[in-house]
Amino acid sequence: MKTFCFTLIISFLGTSTFFAQEVAVLKYDGGGDWYSNPTALPNLVSFCNKNLGTTFSNDVKTVEAQSIDIFQYPFIHMTGHGNVVFSQEQIENLRNYLLSGGFLHIDDNYGMKPYLEKELVRLFPDKQLTELSANHPIFSSYKNFPQGLPKIHEHDGNRPQAMGIFHENRLVLLFTFESDLGDGWESPEVHNDLEEVRQKALDMGANIIKYVFTN
């Protein structure tokens, strides 16, 4: 198994510390629109830099699952609406990345779940997605969400769910479903969301970032 460590540059925020590293968007195969929500992660980065004291670059990179470059990014974001396919090489590299300290946040932009689930079985055949309870610290690391994952965009009327995969008690993968956080992170003119809806999405995004970089 490959191992790696992230260069540590300390930024004090009370008693919290952050890795001063970049975040990236994951490009995947299968025809799904991995490139959807292009303003989402840059906006979340700006929000976290302003409110959490992080020092992420606003020039958010794209990385592929089979690339060694993935090991440069402690936090990878993945989204889309449709099909997701990983080659065996991509599965092995992505698994090594996650087991070596990396983190993957997958935000279903609507329609991704049935395709994603079969690939997650290949990624971790011995692990299952587990729904996070509303009292999990990821919902209160920056702003408190006592009901758990917020609903940002309505699709099928189902409740929002945050599901995770754990390795040795560490959350290595978070799948947010029926919430559409990324739509809420997008620039205001994209979806014409109310400011309070965007604020809720950005606050939850900051929760995820802060949790990942302090745990």
Image (cartoon, rainbow, N blue to C red):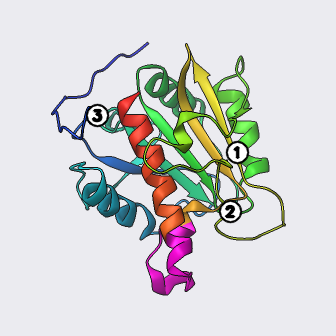
Going 73% across and 58% down the picture, which residue do you hit? 178
Residue 77 percent coordinates (x, y) = 48, 49
Residue 19 percent coordinates (x, y) = 25, 35
> Secondary structure of the magenta portion, mostly?
helix
Mark 2 → mark 3, Cα distance in angstroms: 28 Å
Q: Quadrant of the N terminus?
A: top left
Q: Which residue is mark 3?
A: 16
Going 47% across and 22% down the picture, which residue do you hit? 96
* Magenta segment: 183-198
The numbered mark at residue 116 is 1
Helix or strand or loop: what does disc 3 sit on? loop
Q: Tell whether label 1 touches label 3 (CB within 8 Å).
A: no
Label 1 sits on what residue type?
Leu
- Is 23 placed left or right of 65 in the picture? left
Going 46% across and 82% down the picture, which residue do you hit? 188
Q: Which residue is mark 2?
A: 151
